[in-house]
Amino acid sequence: MSLRAACKTVQVSLSGHYYRSRCRSNDEVIEALNAVIERHPRWGFWKCFHRLRLDGRVWNHKRVHRIYCTLKLNLPRRTKHRMPSRIREQLVVPHQINQVWSADFMADSLYGGRAFRTFNIIDDYHREAIAIEVDTSLPATRLIRVFDQLKAWRTLPKRLRVDNGPEFTSAVFIGWAAQHGIEIRYIQPGNPNQNAFIERFNRSYREEVLNAYLFSSLDEVREITYEWLSDYNEKRPHNALHQLPPVDYARLNVPKNSPLTCST
């Protein structure tokens, strides 16, 4: 059978039979790129390309870039952000109300599995629980809104003790604090004991609320938290306050020249 008849039998064109692909193999380019990236993982495309040219590779930059992207070498690489150095400060009890507040986050989940967070604030002087904000997301702008609501009925603190979370280190929150004359005191990373007042409060809130109930909704968390907050401030004896609730202790020990702004 002739070649023409054979191609017609299997329904292949004669030109298709004679066609030879001119595509070049990219194995050599891939191997060379991987070798450069292995030695210099922080180099970008153009540094790699010029290094290949210096090594005598005359490949077109468009071809090299296409292979570079196919290998996903152009994806941004994660870098570690170095935390600024924090000075360790001795944890002391303030001399008056609204001198130092402590703030921290907690996390839990509803019965259906939906996660939520709480933002807790206390006054270090008499351990009063000033606020507990509950929601699925609590960015820096939400924290500012909480403090603005507190400003409507009480004096904001002179200093705020917090950890190094992104909400507290954001430019938005730092700028708001500077605008209101609040000095932010950051604890050293990995040392929650430097914020012991709020950590002890978190333990009570965890044991008496978060671990004690199965919540079906955020509204239920907020309602139970609000009731517990009132009981904590007005009725619950505190070991560090001579077995007095925070509100009663503030009434008896607040300095005469310092305005009493705690909740009643």
Image (cartoon, helix red, strand yellow):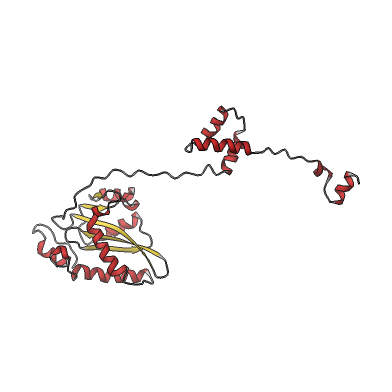
Inspect this view and state whether residue 44 appears. Answer: no
* 228 sits to left or right of 237: right
The number of discs equals: 0
> Residue at coordinates 16% horizontally, 53% vertically from top-left?
92
Q: Position of residue 31 (x, y in %)?
A: 59, 37
Of the pair 263 and 79, the residue shown nearer to us = 79
Picture quarter with the C terminus:
bottom left
Q: Where is residue 83 in the image (x, y as percent from the top left)?
A: 33, 45
> Residue at coordinates 36% horizontally, 68% vertically from top-left?
218
Specify the quadrant of the image occupied by residue 262. Answer: bottom left
Q: Position of residue 100 (x, y in %)?
A: 20, 54
Question: Which residue lies most toward the left here?
Answer: 256
Of the pair 256 and 125, the residue shown nearer to us = 125
Question: Which residue lies most toward the right here?
Answer: 1
Of the pair 249 and 17, the residue shown nearer to us = 17
Please determine whether, in this image, residue 196 is positioned above or below residue 220. Answer: above
Inspect this view and state whether residue 206 appears. Answer: yes
Please determine whether, in this image, residue 37 is positioned above or below residue 221. Answer: above
> Residue at coordinates 85% horizontally, 47% vertically from top-left?
7
Specify the quadrant of the image occupied by residue 34. Answer: top right
Of the pair 219 and 209, the residue shown nearer to us = 209
Specify the quadrant of the image occupied by residue 256. Answer: bottom left
Q: Where is residue 42 in the image (x, y as percent from the top left)?
A: 47, 38
> Residue at coordinates 40% horizontally, 70% vertically from top-left?
111
Please determine whether, in this image, residue 13 is positioned above or below residue 97. Answer: above
* 88 sits to left or right of 257: right
